[in-house]
Structures are given as structure tokens and as C-alpha cells.
């Protein structure tokens, strides 16, 4: 486990050595906090979402997997590591080629609920993303077989079954929750 002083600046956090094994850290309230370790269904959903996003937007922007992003939360530096993010080439030049945290606010952040997390915890995190000017946040719940979309100016909307998820912000990206869960080979019911 990473040992750090009580409070970290953004620069100190970004200069920390890599975590041990597969541990990834987020900067939250000036603390290096370990991120939940994904399980099989989480991994399958991530892969399927990558495929959908790449088919739609590979030429439109950058699709990041567990790519840290520099944001602010409650007036403090915040470096979350979303499961996936999408940032258009209008926000981040295709010529930007640094091996570091995403320097701009992405249009889309996707979080997949892990067994140790609750929908409520990720809904609070979605609000933090929106407050940081992320335009859309998707929370994917494999147990409920749903995708909840959070908007900065409207109530969240939950998509299940064959209800088509489409958004003018991501023109041409259309799929249903059921298509995603079938693509990821998530069984209809599991404990």
C-alpha cells in the first residue's frame, strides 16, 4: 500500500510512484485513495463499451480506459480515474501525446458499479463530475442491467432493456442496455 503524507498537492500526487500490483489511486480531498479492483463482469462491460465507443468515435476523439483526469471538486484538485472516458478532439488536440493525466474536462465519463460499490456512491461521484463540467456521466449497473445517464441540466435517466440510448451530444452513438449486456455476456440474473 502506498504510504503518503496526510495531504498531497496535485503536483505531489502526479509525481507519486506507480501503485503496487494492479492498485490504481485517485486524488480525493488531497489524499491518495485506492480505486476498487474490477471483477470479471466489470472487465467484460469495459471491453464491450470500448468496442461500442471505438466503432462510433475513434476518429472523433480520445477514448480512455482508467485514464486519470485533472478536475476540481469542492474547490480542490481532484484526480479521479473513471473506468472509461471520452474527450473530443475539439477539447484535446489529436496531436497531444503526453503520458500523463488527461489535462482537459472530458465530455463523457463512464463508471461501472463494482461489487464493493453502491449506486448511491457513484451517483454522488456523478454529481461531482457534472460540477467539474463533465457533460455526461453514465453509471452502468450489471445487477440491475441498466445504464443511468446523468446530465448537468436535467434529471438522470435510466435505460433498461430495449430502450434506445442516444444523445445529441454523441450523434450517431445508439445502443440499448440489453445490447450492451448481451455483448458483454452478462447473464440475465446473477447474485
Image (cartoon, helix red, strand yellow):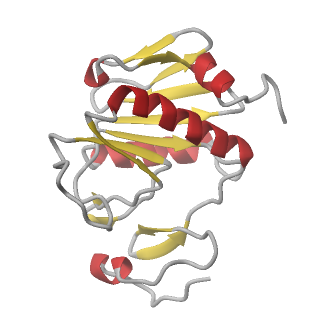
Quarter holding residue 90:
top left
Q: Which of 7 and 43 is in front in this view?
A: 43
x and y percent of residue 151 in the render? 34, 30
Whether residue 73 is visible, yes or no, is no
- Measured from the top left, where is residue 128 in percent x and y? 37, 49
* 181 shown above or below 172: below
Which residue is more in the foreground, 48 or 129? Answer: 48
* Drawn side of residue 76 relative to residue 36, left or right: left
Q: Where is residue 17 in the image (x, y as percent from the top left)?
A: 46, 84
* Image: 188 above or below 85: above
Tell me which residue sits at (49%, 79%) in the image: 18
Q: Which residue extends farthest right?
A: 191
Q: Position of residue 70 (x, y in %)?
A: 29, 61
Q: Which residue is drawn at 62% across and 69% down?
A: 22
Residue drawn at the location 64% of the way across and 25% of the way down: 183
Residue at the image point whose x is 66% and y is 48% from the top: 114
Vertical placement of 36 versus 2: above or below? above
Residue 50 visible from this viewpoint = yes
Q: State whether residue 7 is above or below residue 119.
A: below
Amino acid at each position: 500500500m502506498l504510504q503518503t503524507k496526510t495531504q498531497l498537492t496535485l503536483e505531489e500526487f502526479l509525481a507519486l510512484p506507480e501503485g503496487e500490483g494492479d492498485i490504481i489511486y485517485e486524488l480525493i480531498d488531497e489524499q491518495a485513495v485506492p480505486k476498487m479492483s474490477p471483477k470479471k463482469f466489470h472487465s467484460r462491460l469495459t471491453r464491450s463499451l470500448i468496442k461500442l465507443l471505438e466503432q462510433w468515435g475513434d476518429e472523433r476523439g480520445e477514448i480512455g480506459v482508467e485514464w486519470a483526469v485533472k478536475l476540481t471538486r469542492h474547490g480542490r484538485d481532484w484526480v479521479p480515474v473513471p473506468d472509461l472516458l471520452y474527450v473530443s478532439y475539439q477539447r484535446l488536440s489529436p496531436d497531444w501525446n503526453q503520458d500523463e493525466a488527461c489535462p482537459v474536462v472530458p465530455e463523457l465519463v463512464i463508471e461501472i458499479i463494482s461489487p464493493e460499490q453502491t449506486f448511491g456512491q457513484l451517483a454522488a461521484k456523478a454529481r461531482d463530475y457534472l460540477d467539474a463540467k463533465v457533460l455526461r456521466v453514465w453509471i452502468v449497473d450489471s445487477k440491475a442491467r441498466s445504464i443511468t445517464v446523468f446530465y448537468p441540466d436535467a434529471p438522470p435517466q435510466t435505460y433498461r432493456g430495449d430502450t434506445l440510448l442516444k444523445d445529441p451530444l454523441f450523434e450517431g452513438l445508439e445502443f440499448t442496455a440489453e445490447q450492451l449486456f448481451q455483448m458483454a455476456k452478462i447473464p440475465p440474473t446473477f447474485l
